[in-house]
Image: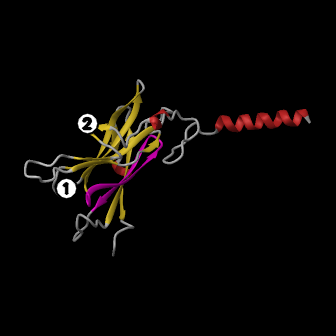
Amino acid sequence: MPLLAAASLLFVAACAATAPKTAVSNHGAPRGLDTTIRTVDFQNFTYEDVTVKDGEYERPKDADGDSQGFFSAGKPVYGDVDGDNVEDAIVITIDNSGGTGMFDAARVYMMRNGAPVQVAAVPGGDRGDGGLRDVTVEPGGLIVERFLSGDGDGACCPSQITVEHWRWTGKDLAIDEQRSKTIPNPDHDN
């Protein structure tokens, strides 16, 4: 019996040695990763010169009482973007300066000396004109879904989505054009 138990332990140890050390996660905290970045409250955070509360900031009205727009931050997506075994955060922000344009970006944050630092950003667009639909983490980078309007589509209702793969270069993100593809938007009303 002791020989069987020892053999079982060796088998479990051998399997564990070959198992991947990191897992990509957009929801629950993956095992084996430093998840310190999850302590940052990105919904009550300063982005450049704008501080959001509960993910929102409304710019003060101008002298005539007209809206000067808003800034909003979505809930973060987590995962190991750069493969260093430390979880990172990606936050999609939307910036509106009072007109109809709503320009977004996917901001990538990593912990540096105990504080979150924006290390990269994937530029977005204006709703159906290159706006971001979704961002997920894949090993060594991001998958970005971007709205693409076809002929006759309005800014509200793009009929296509471009799926892009962005790779971590060691200092920034770069798009992998060969892996990008355009697909029909499943939410588009036909």
Relative vertical location of residue 75 with respect to residue 100 in this rendering, above or below: above
Q: Earlier in the sequence, mark 2 or mark 1?
A: 2
Q: Position of residue 24 (x, y in %)?
A: 51, 44
Q: Position of residue 78 (x, y in %)?
A: 46, 43
Q: Which residues are magenta?
A: 127-148
In this picture the colour scheme is: secondary structure
Q: Is most of the magenta stretch helix, strand or loop? A: strand
Quarter of the image with the C terminus is bottom left
Relative vertical location of residue 189 with respect to residue 77 in this rendering, above or below: below
- The residue that disc 1 covers is 101
Helix, strand or loop at disc 1? loop
Crowding at dot 1, Cα within 10 Å, few <14 / some 14-19 / many 20+, comes out as: some
Q: Position of residue 116 (x, y in %)?
A: 38, 32
Tag 2: amino acid:
Glu
Q: Residue at x 26, y 61 (%)?
A: 128
**Residue furthest left in the image:** 64
Q: Residue at x 51, y 48 (%)?
A: 27
Relative vertical location of residue 47 with respect to residue 188 in this rendering, above or below: above
- The residue that disc 2 covers is 48
Crowding at dot 2, Cα within 10 Å, few <14 / some 14-19 / many 20+, comes out as: few
18 left or right, relative to 152: right
**Quadrant in which residue 6 is drawn:** top right
Q: Residue at x 19, y 51 (%)?
A: 69
Quarter of the image with the N terminus is top right
Of 120 and 10, the residue lying toward us:
120
Tag 1: amino acid:
Gly
**Residue furthest right in the image:** 1
Could you say which disc has been placed on residue 155 in the image? none
